[in-house]
Amino acid sequence: MSQAAALQVDATLAALADPHRRRVVDLLSRGPRAAGDLARELDLSPPAMSRHLRTLRQSGLVEESHPTFDARVRIYALRPEPMVHLLRWLEDAERLWSEQLVAFKAHIEKDA
């Protein structure tokens, strides 16, 4: 894994460490939403929601846009790239553990 990809995985995992941010990602997986709608859905104050959205934005998990009818409204949507890096990392880890378990099984069966 490249250094850039490793840094992206670190940022993704750090952002997803908080249950509120995981819930935001879950809600956004169904489609873009306004920041106010997310705050109401999670029963968070606007400042608290803003802090969570800033962390998700800085990690690259979400992107922000403004509708043409009202620049004060912020719409958030998921970005797939960070999850792709995380999925690749998980696949590599799973492959490593599978290989280790197969080798361990062969060792045990050889001695049996």
Image: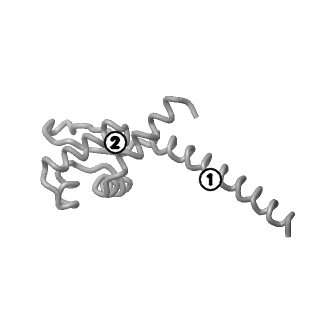
Residue located 43% across and 40% down the image: 10
x and y, in percent, of residue 54 in the image: 25, 40
Q: What residue type is disc 1 on?
A: Glu
Residue located 69% across and 56% down the image: 98
Q: What residue type is disc 2 on?
A: Val
x and y, in percent, of residue 105 in the image: 77, 63
Residue sitting farthest toward the front: 111
User: Residue 62 or 15: which is nearer the viewer?
Assistant: 15
Element assignment for label 1? helix
Q: Is the residue under label 2 in contact with that under label 1 (CB below 8 Å)? A: no
Q: Earlier in the sequence, mark 1 or mark 2?
A: 2
Residue located 19% across and 45% down the image: 50
Query: From the viewer's perspective, is 62 left or right of 39?
Result: right
Residue sitting farthest toward the top: 3
**Cα distance, mark 1 to mark 2?**
26 Å
x and y, in percent, of residue 19 in the image: 31, 57
**Where is 86 relative to 6, above or below?**
below
User: Residue 87 or 105: which is nearer the viewer?
Assistant: 105
The residue pinned by badge 1 equals 94
Residue sitting farthest toward the bottom: 112
Can you tell which of label 1 and label 2 is closer to the viewer?
Answer: 1
Q: Residues within 10 Å of mark 2 (few under 14, many from 20)?
A: many
The residue pinned by badge 2 equals 62
For the N terminus, the image quarter is top right
